[in-house]
Image (cartoon, grey):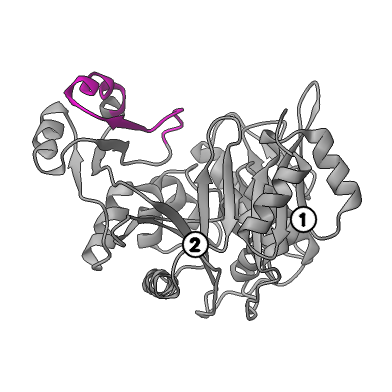
Amino acid sequence: MVHRFYPGTCIGIIGSGHSSALLAQEAGRLGYHVGSLVTQAWNGVRQFASWQKVVDSYSTEELLAFGEQVDLVYIEPGLLSNRDFRLLSQVTYLPLKDDLIAISTDRLIEKAYLDSNKHLVPPFSMVTNLEDILEAVEYIGYPCVLKSAQRNLGIKSDQVILFNEEDLTQVTKLLDQGTCILEAWIPVEKKVTLTIVQNEAGQQMVYPGFEVVDKGDLIGRQVRYPATVSESVQDEIERIGRSIAQSLAVVGAINIEYFMTSAGVIYVNHASLGLKAAGMFTHKVMSMPMDEATCRALVGLPLCKLESQVPAAIALPIAALNIEKVMIQYMTRTDWDFVFLNQPQKSVNLLEGLVVVTGEDLSDCDQQITITNLYHA
């Protein structure tokens, strides 16, 4: 049976990130109430929520109480454990099946699933102590990456890059947290992310692949569309994405990150559920932004055909830009897009989000960025 939720019902959103704020905004626009559960009093979701509860932690008591007040729940990626998901499913509709819950909370299960379904993933091994790491390095080699198997540890960094034996002194903290995964370091030429939104009826919206490029500390990350890959590569990553979304019976958004080497090898680095901040760029680029499509999928609305609105676009995080120069462009341009989110703090109202520069091609976008001198002087 397909679950359908009509306007006037309440969508519960757990988390306070950019994607949660935009999802709450879209839910309200579509006629739904939004209940928000957060651990930070100052957040960007509250301006779009019908009501919000701030808690010290996502404890069993708070999760159950929240679940009983809403009709369905969307959970920001990486916040809750497998057990937390199961608790919520007892009191409200959770659009995640058991295998999806496991994959969204455990990297080891995610890798094992992808590997067992014949998707090429970087070589990996489960490790629980230093002896396991030394044994795994024998066939994985250096450099490699040690990651916590669990995604909801709440620590600043849940991975360590190991270049040689001397770096083994850095692994203790992660190993103390529990089971880890040791993964080979892939020499990556491109990182391409593909997002698929799917509803319970199996309808899909497949967003074109986009590149996430790290330009260093001063400039930060850029989201670039279209990804500079061949048509055959685009077809292959779409085929893989559709297959994963269908086999997992995803309801909502799934993001698949691909590593591409100079030799043309395509690795599936990871498959994560839920909205990502980088998806904000689709507000100008696509006929339906990812947050609106995800909201429609969650409540059982049909998904329409996706169309590109511009030939090319580059999304720039506002945090890396000169805000005065951004405002000059905001007041004069109609061809760019500006996705602003207010992040109220105790002492100042902080503006966050993206500037989406559009053009005839990526070189045209780059030229516009240079001419307008958006980055900090």
**Mark 1 or 2 closer to N-term?**
2
Residues under numbered marks 1 and 2 in contact, where contact means CB atoms less than 8 Å apart: no
Residue drawn 52% across and 50% down? 212
Where residue 228 is drawn, which disc sits there? 2
Q: Compare residues 156 and 144 and report the one nearer the observer.
A: 144
Seen in the image, is 136 located left or right of residue 59? left
Counting from the top left corner in percent of width and height, residue 147 is at 31, 37
Seen in the image, is 219 located left or right of residue 81? right
Q: Is residue 332 above or below residue 95?
A: above
Q: Compare residues 136 and 151 and report the one nearer the observer.
A: 136
Q: Compare residues 248 and 194 and report the one nearer the observer.
A: 194
Query: Hey, which quadrant is residue 242 in on the image?
Result: bottom left
Where residue 337 is drawn, which disc sits there? 1
Residue type, label 2: Thr
Q: Is residue 105 above or below residue 227?
A: above
Which quarter of the rendering shows the C terminus? top right
